[in-house]
Image (spheres, helix red, strand yellow):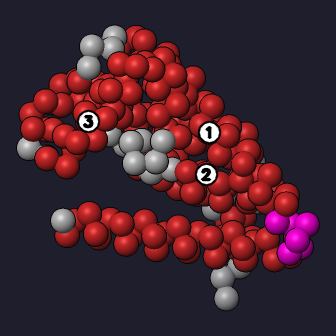
């Protein structure tokens, strides 16, 4: 049986590196799980928030600049993206500041939004400032939410079983992510 505590002791920063990379690619689930691990005492909540912030921020900035450089041609070749891009444009026109601050919280639009914003007339400086604030809010919200969930779960199932719960949730999240990835590639 794998001894999680031994792995974490031997590879102290590995969970943070995984978190940074995972939040660069996706995000919410792993940040919540890391927050639970922080409650258990295995990880540092401030470092979780920092990694989630950096991964999310860097990803969205990169996608924004890709949208700025190659956006129109890229979307023109993807009819499924065109529908979501139109929706993002509408939201951007109506609620620009709030939308840029909060797009990370909108399921189904999170990944395409910085790309479409890059294609829009939004100034780079404005996006960077709002993106920094939004990434910070997102990282604190989801890591803190995981920590609070861990606190509540600990009261119901006990500290001893909290690690198993986190591993079960990690397995479910990983399997779900892989299934979605496979389905996207098939279509």
> Are the residues tagged 3 and 1 within 8 Å (C-beta)?
no
Element assignment for label 1 = helix
Q: Which residue is mark 1?
A: 139
How packed is label 3: few (under 14 Cα within 10 Å), some, or many (20 or more)? many
Is 3 left or right of 105, judged from the image as shown?
A: right
Q: Position of residue 154 (x, y in %)?
A: 86, 66
- Pointers 2 and 1 in contact (CB under 8 A)? yes
Q: Is residue 15 above or below residue 24?
A: below
Callout 3: helix, strand or loop? helix
Q: CA distance from mark 3 to mark 1?
A: 25 Å
Image coords of residue 42 (percent x, y) = 77, 60
- In percent of the image, x 24 and y 29: which residue is there? 67
Magenta residues, start to end: 153-158
Query: Is 128 above or below relative to 27?
Result: above
Nearer to the camera, 12 or 143:
143
Task: Work out whether mark 3 precedes mark 1 in sequence or the reverse, and give the earlier one.
Answer: 3
Label of residue 153 in the image: none
Q: Residue at x 31, y 35 (%)?
A: 87
């Amino acid at each position: 049986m794998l001894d999680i505590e031994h792995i974490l002791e031997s590879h102290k920063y590995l969970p943070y590196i995984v978190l940074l990379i995972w939040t660069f690619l996706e995000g919410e689930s792993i940040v919540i799980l890391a927050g639970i691990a922080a409650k258990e005492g295995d990880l540092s909540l401030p470092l979780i928030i920092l990694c989630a912030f950096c991964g999310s921020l860097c990803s969205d900035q990169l996608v924004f600049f890709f949208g700025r450089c190659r956006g129109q041609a890229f979307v023109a070749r993807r009819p499924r993206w065109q529908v979501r891009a139109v929706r993002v444009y509408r939201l951007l026109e109506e609620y620009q500041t709030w939308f840029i601050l909060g797009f990370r919280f909108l399921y189904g639009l999170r990944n395409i939004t910085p790309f479409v914003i890059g294609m829009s007339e939004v100034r780079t400086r404005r996006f960077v400032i709002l993106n920094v604030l939004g990434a910070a809010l997102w990282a604190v919200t989801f890591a803190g939410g995981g920590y609070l969930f861990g606190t509540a779960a600990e009261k119901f199932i006990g500290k001893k079983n909290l690690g198993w719960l986190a591993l079960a949730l990690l397995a479910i999240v990983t399997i779900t992510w892989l299934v979605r990835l496979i389905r996207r590639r098939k279509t």
